[in-house]
Image (cartoon, helix red, strand yellow):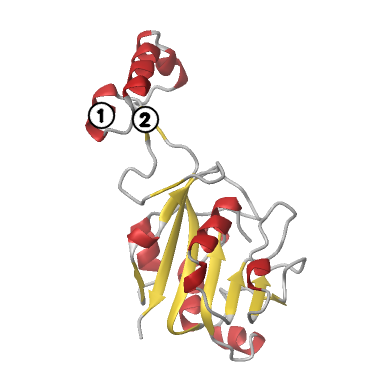
Amino acid sequence: MGDINQLLFIKKNIDKIKGPILEVGSKNYGNTQDLRSLFENVDYIGIDMEDGNGVDIVLDLTKDFNFIEDKLEGKRFQTIVCFSVLEHCSDPFKMCSNIERLLKKNSLVFISVPFSWRIHGYPNDYWRFTPEGIKILFPNLKFDLKEGCLSTGKPGVDRSIDDYMLRVELDLKKARERRIYRNFNLYFLRVLKKLKIIDWISDNSYLFPPVTINMIGRKRA
């Protein structure tokens, strides 16, 4: 399952997605998006560590691969979706290795992980990620950052992946250098600085909103 921006990320790339599809972390908690409904005529399997709505097979992907293969009856997938799961996994290296092994040749993995987010336990929350960290977790996949995007908690907001990771610049000089604000916004920011409102909000020269990284990995043939 995913949030609205993860659903939009799938819709944006839906022409690339082929079955069979495996969704990792498919349990519907009542406030998540139903990705399965986009693929009604496609072979689609949802797995999660807990049984519930949207879960076809209860399965922990940090288990031994032979156990996983038995549970999935040797099935391999053309597309694997793993949204908002890896931060809750105590052994993401093992999970990602097993995900790679479940892929067919020339297949895709859709990954969505937090870069900056509040701690949210389901049941626990362990990690935050960078784009380069995702590449290390999936050494046999090829990622093109141009295909990915950054999103926030605000529906419909997505930006290209860069080194700033949606950082909100409060330093006027740096804001001008980055050209991230229009003239009116710069003027407004200058007024807030003079009134010391920004200093009251934060002692730092920048802020981070909630930021999620959305990426697509391709398995090499």
Residue 127 relative to residue 67: left or right: left
The picture quadrant where one finds residue 21 is bottom right
User: Which sits in the foreground, 203 or 169?
Assistant: 169
- Name the residue carrying label 2: 206
Identify the mark at residue 97; answer none if there is no mark: none
Identify the mark at residue 174; answer none if there is no mark: 1
Task: Look at 30% across and 47% down and name the residue there.
Answer: 163
Q: Amino acid at mark 1?
A: Lys
Point out residue 73 in the picture as x, y percentages from the top left corner: 64, 91
Query: Is residue 96 visible to the viewer in this orientation of the structure?
Result: no
Which badge, 2 or 1, comes first in the chain's sequence? 1
Crowd rating for badge 1 (residues with CA inside 10 Å; few <14, some 14–19, many 20+)? few
Question: Which residue sits furthest top?
Answer: 195
Task: Look at 36% across and 86% down and name the residue there.
Answer: 221
User: Which sits in the foreground, 51 or 21?
Assistant: 21
Q: What is the quadrant of the N terminus in the image? A: bottom right
Query: Which element type, helix, strand or loop, lies under badge 1?
Result: helix
- Residue contact between numbered discs 2 and 1, judged by CB atoms under 8 Å: yes
Crowd rating for badge 2 (residues with CA inside 10 Å; few <14, some 14–19, many 20+)? some
Point out residue 161 in the picture as x, y percentages from the top left corner: 36, 51
Point out residue 98 in the picture as x, y percentages from the top left corner: 50, 78
